[in-house]
Amino acid sequence: MKVLYSCLSKSWGGMEMYTLTSVKQLLSHNIGVELLCIKGSTLQNEAKSSGIITHSISGDSYFNPAGIFRIISLISKGNFDIIHTQASRDLWLLVPALKLAGSKIPLVFTKQVGSFVVKRDLLHRIIYNRVNLAFAISGVIKKNMIDTTPLPPDKIRLLYNCIDVNRFDPANARRTEIRNEFNVPESELLIGMMARFSPGKGHEEFLGAAKILKETYNNLKFVIVGKASYGEEDYERKIKELAEKSGLSNVVIFTGFRKDTLNVLSAMDIFVFPSHAEAFGIALIEAMAMQLPTVASNADGVLDITIDGETGYLFENKNVNDLRDKISRLIKSREDRIKFGKAGRKRVIDKFNIEKQTTEIIDIYSSLISKNL
């Protein structure tokens, strides 16, 4: 089996990172995979550094004749059995290329982000009619696809994003080393969030809650992990200025982008996921796998992940005071922190285990290829 994976994005966030994870996972199961990406993107650079075969096109617009002809050449010579894209906008290049090449290769795409645009006009019907199967990464995304695309419901399957639960295991982490790096003694609780700097990720609410909690407790530190993605550098500066203006400079740590995610998570005592409208939440399940108690917004894809009062607390979306209250409950109760952490890891192992998911995806690929023969 040979798969062409696609993610034509200049950014470096959850979708792009998950693309790389998925490609590596398939390769580890002896599936031949090559990656189509934007020339010079972080995704291409990271993939190359991992020894993955990449093919690139320039530009990421919907109208890209040069890109289409590049893909025609690629699929004509590549002997691919299936094409899988993690970005629905890629369909605007992949579908014309497949049609012009006269190729019947099965086309699968994963919907990572919701859309408010109804896509049932003639052009969208032509594009989506070529899709053999679509995966939705959460219940809210599945509903969004049914509501906005011309795909029939029987072509849409719920398939959560997953992680390697053997890698994200507290037994593998270096908590003390990371806390020493951050200068956080064990006598202090470290409360953290992990997200790229982008509007809607909840940085303002996190800092707002931190400002209030700082006045109540004298044993807290806060950590924000991540960096700005392409074109969002101004937002990162704004958040850092907000922390300074809020008098939080001595208790908030900005780590920038970190590759040692599991070690950074192991240094935390409470994980906060304040995103306003997240399709899913890889960082949240990573934290849960690391046995961290969590506080997350009660919105969208988070509802597929957290069980309120069992694996963590849900707070009212964008409500700083409710976020503060839920974090405070965990600060006060070490017993609940331990209980939620254990329950969270168990849930991730049961529902968001990438080994189980990869086996399922390979079976789906095989079925689609068989139908195409």
Image (spheres, rainbow, N blue to C red):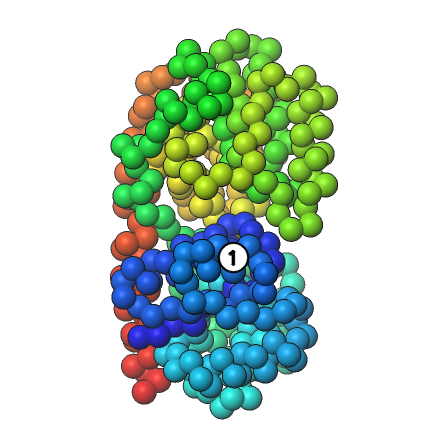
Residue at the image point whose x is 59% and y is 65% from the top: 39
Residue at the image point whose x is 36% and y is 17% from the top: 334
Instruction: Tell me the kind of residue under disc 1.
Output: Asn
Check disc 1: other Cα within 10 Å, few if <14, some if 14-19, many if 20+.
Answer: some
In the rendered image, the quadrant that contains the C terminus is bottom left
Say what secondary structure mark 1 lies in.
Answer: helix
Q: Is residue 176 above or below residue 58?
A: above
Question: How many marks are shown on the rendered structure?
Answer: 1
Percent of width and height locating residue 245? 72, 21
Residue 95 visible: no
In the rendered image, the quadrant that contains the N terminus is bottom left
Residue at the image point whose x is 54% and y is 32% from the top: 255
Percent of width and height locating residue 282? 44, 45
Q: Is residue 122 above or below residue 331?
A: below
Residue nearer the viewer, 117 or 30: 30
Q: Is residue 242 left or right of residue 348?
A: right
Residue at the image point whose x is 46% and y is 17% from the top: 184
Percent of width and height locating residue 240? 67, 30
Determine which quarter of the picture holds residue 320: top right
Percent of width and height locating residue 168? 33, 40
Determine which quarter of the picture holds residue 11: bottom right
Residue 86 visible: yes
Residue nearer the viewer, 127 or 268: 268
Q: Is residue 277 above or below residue 150?
A: above
Determine which quarter of the picture holds residue 284: top left
Q: Is residue 151 left or right of residue 197?
A: left
Q: Which residue is mark 1?
A: 45
